[in-house]
Amino acid sequence: MNFYSFYKKFGLYAILVLVFAFFSIFAPHFFSGANFLNILRQVSIFGTAVIGATIVMIGGGADMSVGGMVAMGGIIAAMAMTTWGLPIWAAILLTILFCCLIGFLNGFLTVTLFIPGFITTLGMMLVLNGMAYVISGGYAIFGLPSEYAFLGQGYIGFLPVPVIIFVIVCVAGTFLMTKTYYGRSVYALGGNPTAANLAGINVKKVTIIAYVLCGFVAALAALMQLSRSNSAQPGVGASYPFDCMSAAVLGGISMSGGKGKIYGAIVGVLIIGILNNGLQLMGCNANLVDVVKGVILIAAVGIDCLYNNRGSLSARLF
């Protein structure tokens, strides 16, 4: 068994165990039930967004606008409840519709203008981030209804509501990608778009739906983040694009598309969450966390490029 085969089979779980063991030994208060629940609460919002980004990546695309949707979605929901006087349910629906529309635009521009998804969504990220700052004036929006706090801060039993939503999204995403015709179509599209088209798969439709799904879960993440912080902040999604990509690639999702599983991305989310939590408990500089995540992203993508369709990756990005 060569290194790549070992990494694909056991590497992800070995990394999870090693990271967990390291912080259990060296990080104060890491090994406790309260902290484990705190890690789950921290990763649930970000992890929800990762599921959508993972579906897009399996289809051979990339969505860099996730953070922008989280930021702008939060601004819209907050303004709907505080400035426009809409009820909570209407604000939630408006946010979901907005993010799904952005996802539709991402997919539509990608398949009709033949702009690489990475570039399309990178541009959309800049547009959304700019809009979030312009509309909010660069300030956080406060004054949300007290009932809304339940979505991001409430509990059902002993489990935080965001964790429950994350689990539901993970189960739904796994079912979609493993048990449905659409899921098989996404894998076929990511593996070989030309062959998928010749096999009768509506490549444009599958691509657009993938981006819409990513917009939908980004809206859920935005709504939970807004509730958890009890305010809408224009810069809240700045780290999401690269964190989502890091978690997905670390979890075995190929940058060239067509390979990887939802459960792998979930494990990647847990590793990123444990790293964030453990380094913070050790009192490390916040910038060091970004350094570690950057190294992980480069290493994971490097392994993927060395052993899995280097030429295809270059073609997709450039």
Image (cartoon, rainbow, N blue to C red):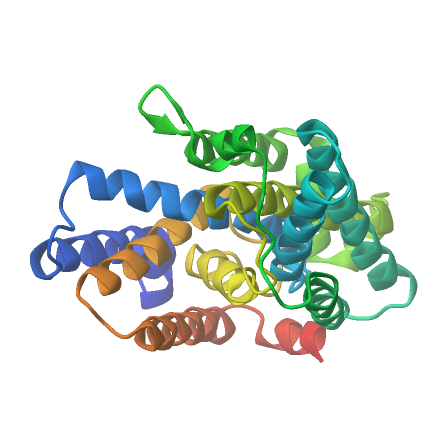
Residue 115 point in image, percent of width and height: 83, 70
Which quarter shows the C terminus? bottom right
The residue lying at 21 percent from left, 52 percent from top is 17
As drawn, 83 above or below 141: above
Q: Which one is in front, 295 or 186? A: 295
The residue lying at 67 percent from left, 52 percent from top is 75
Left or right placement of residue 134 versus residue 4 in this view = right
> Quarter of the image holding residue 26?
bottom left
Q: Which one is in front, 19 or 308? A: 19
Residue 20 point in image, percent of width and height: 20, 53
Q: Which one is in front, 233 or 260? A: 233
Instruction: Give the farthest residue toward the right.
Output: 112
The residue lying at 29 percent from left, 50 percent from top is 13
As drawn, 18 above or below 176: below
Q: How many marks?
A: 0
Q: Which one is in front, 287 or 5? A: 287
Residue 43 point in image, percent of width and height: 40, 48
> Quarter of the image holding residue 40?
top left
Instruction: Give the farthest residue toward the left.
Output: 25
Residue 231 point in image, percent of width and height: 54, 49
Instruction: Give the farthest residue toward the top.
Output: 157
Which quarter shows the N terminus? bottom left
- Is there any visible trace of residue 198 in the rendered image? no
Left or right placement of residue 134 versus residue 160 in this view = right
